[in-house]
Amino acid sequence: MLQALREKTSGWIAIVIVAILAIPFAFFGMEQYLFQSSANYAAKVEAPPSWWRSAPDIWPVRKAVWQSREVSPEEFRMEFEAARQQARATQGEAFDARAFEQVENKLAVLDQLVDRAVLSLAADGMGIAVGNSQVREVVQSMPEFQVDGRFDPQRYQMLLQSRVPVQTPREHQEDIRGRLEMVMLPSRVAGSAFASQGELDRMMGLLGQQRDVAVAMLPAPEPDTGAISAAEIQAWYDGHRGDYRAPEEVSIEYVEILGDAVPEPAAPDEASLRARYEQEKSRFVEPEQRLVSHILVRVPEGADDAARDAAKQRAEAVAARARAEGADFAAIAGEESDDEGSKAGGGDLGWLERGIMGDSFDNAVYSVEPGIPSEPVLTDFGWHVLLVREVREGKEVPFEEVRAELAEAQATTDRERAFNDLIGRLVDQVYRNPSSLAPAAREAGLPVQKAGPFVRGGGEGIAADPAVQRAAFSDALVQDGTVSDPIELGGNHSVLIRVTAHQPERERPLAEVRDEVVSAIRADRASKALLAVADAAVAEIADGKPLAEVADGKGWAHMDLPGMRRGMPMPSAEANEAVFAAPEPAEGKVSAGRVVQDDGSIVLYAVSKITPGDAGEGSEQERAMLQTQLARMAGDEDALALMRALRQRMRVTTVEARL
């Protein structure tokens, strides 16, 4: 039999079958073997080129002509860290770093980066570009780079230098350019949305709608006093076991280490301070600075030769006027400059140093003669007429002027080193005795303290700190009973803890929670009884019986509320919302219903008449504001729809293992 099978599969028929099967594998399977293992990205977005929108999504074509953008693991980590810092700042002590590391959070951050890559590819495909002037306007308008409402070059440079990683002005501007190019498409789509007059009139009619309604108040139910059988108690307990669980608890012992436990270090000697000065000498060098004013004549993006020549001629005329004897440069800048950020201040740009405004501008500033307006100088921003009003020579700050600063820095360093040395000695003791805090406490001369039992989110003092809670409830400390690593609570403030007792989450037996179960049954009975009464009353009102008559028969307080408007908190916000959600009553009928309040009371309502709002009642200002809001809502929806459509046209590949 096997011989026959071999003969059947070794002839020309088998060769044809193998050849046919090889074709789809060549197009759809080979890439899995050739490229997947070498991928070095967290996500990759691929799109057909602009000149072949319908390029098929098959491997050879995609590899040959499709465009792509990759999200590197480094880019993801930077964005995820930024999201972590934002969450920490928002949530404060409630922030749980361990929970934040969940895969769902990582995928959400990655999805944002994928959206950026999608928009970047779409912008490239549509030829979207952002010019230098627009980038500069955005940078100068950013509040973090402003002092007293004006762009400050020194602050700009300082903040870029303090970033991690450090950015140069050119790198920052290119980053801004890329972001502007990405958001331009969705922002333009969102900005094109509008609300028609018909939509505005309908919305004004809905917002201005009035309803004539009668309401009755059913007070919160009286406590149930009926007998409760053992079977009912058992049935309720069995059906609500999740409500009767005791939370997880731990007890801990700990050693708290504060900076006060470390003796004050000796004052640094002169040699140490001078050595530190030499090591950090670059910090104490003031670069040359120039106090600069300018008059800008912009060259429009994409301008033709005629427009460029016109801008140059205008700049030359402005320069000649500024260089004339007795000319007021500040006044001319106020009249002629195209730089809206500085013209009001007479073109003043403040003190500048190299590296702030870009190479072309810096070279121009450092090439002009101080005190004399320059001839027009062409930079990336346009034509400038520059005036260097003052020069502050660079200099090295002598040791004597910064000795106090160095001494304070050295003292801080010594205190931190002594504290870290103490922590290191305690950690050594913990390694030698991982199941006891006593040796570490003796090494530091500190007491072993106790806390607990406490639950997650509970505790007092040290036990309430989120970092301590995360460690105390961690599997490692709970299961092993070992001493934790040092937990940093603040500057020169750490703690070592050990879990001494652990009570896992458990189901509380019926005998322990019997009274709670009985109370729940009584509350449920009373609530259901009141709901039954309310539903019967609603049925009577819907059948045509006046609400006032029903309420009087039951002794309920009631009132008529003619002309009720949307959003009025009468008799409550929940009741108002229900009243305006009720269907329009039929001719001669009412639209009845009921609303359960937070306190257990119930509001009955009967809507008898609906009066549409008058679309022309609102003022022009109110109509304009509402129309803007409607257009913004429609624009946001359009932008989201665009984003969904773009992602559907592109191929997105994610590698979760690299997150």
Image: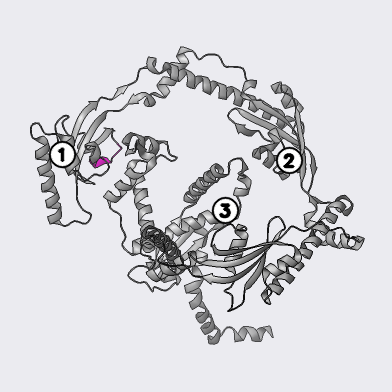
Q: Quadrant of residue 257?
A: top right
Q: Position of residue 515 (x, y in %)?
A: 86, 52
Residue where numbered disc 2 is placed: 477
Question: Which disc is residue 377 wearing?
Answer: none
Q: Is residue 470 left or right of residue 374?
A: right
Rendered-image quadrant of the N terminus: bottom right
Residue furthest to the right: 230
Locate residue 580, reporting x and y percent.
57, 66
Looking at the image, residue 74 lies above or below residue 148: below
Say few, some or many: other residues with alpha carbon within 10 Å of mark 3 (under 14 / 14 to 19 / 20 or more): some
The answer to whether residue 594 is left or right of residue 270 is right
Question: Is mark 2 in CB contact (under 8 Å) with mark 1?
Answer: no
Secondary element type, mark 1: helix
Up/down of 90 relative to 240, above or below: above
Q: Which residue is mark 3?
A: 105
Q: Secondary structure at mark 2?
A: helix
Span of residues in magenta: 355-360
Measured in 3D between alpha carbons, the distance from the residue under mark 2 to the one under mark 1, in whole angstroms, is: 73 Å
Instruction: Say if mark 3 contacts mark 2, CB within 8 Å.
Output: no
Closer to the chain start, of discs 2 and 1, is 1
Please state the horizontal and vertical placement of residue 375, each as a whole percent of the image. 12, 39
* Residue 171 appearing in the image: no
Q: Mark 2, residues whose alpha carbon is within 10 Å: few (<14), some, or many (≥20)?
A: some
> Which of label 1 and label 3 is nearer to you?
1
Q: To which quarter of the image does residue 485 belong?
A: top right
Q: x, y percentage for residue 589?
A: 62, 77
Residue appearing at x 25%, y 44% in the figure: 340
Q: Amino acid at mark 3?
A: Asn
Question: In the image, which disc is placed on residue 332?
Answer: 1
Question: Taking 650 as reference, is 170 above or below it?
Answer: above
Judge whether residue 390 is colored magenta.
Answer: no
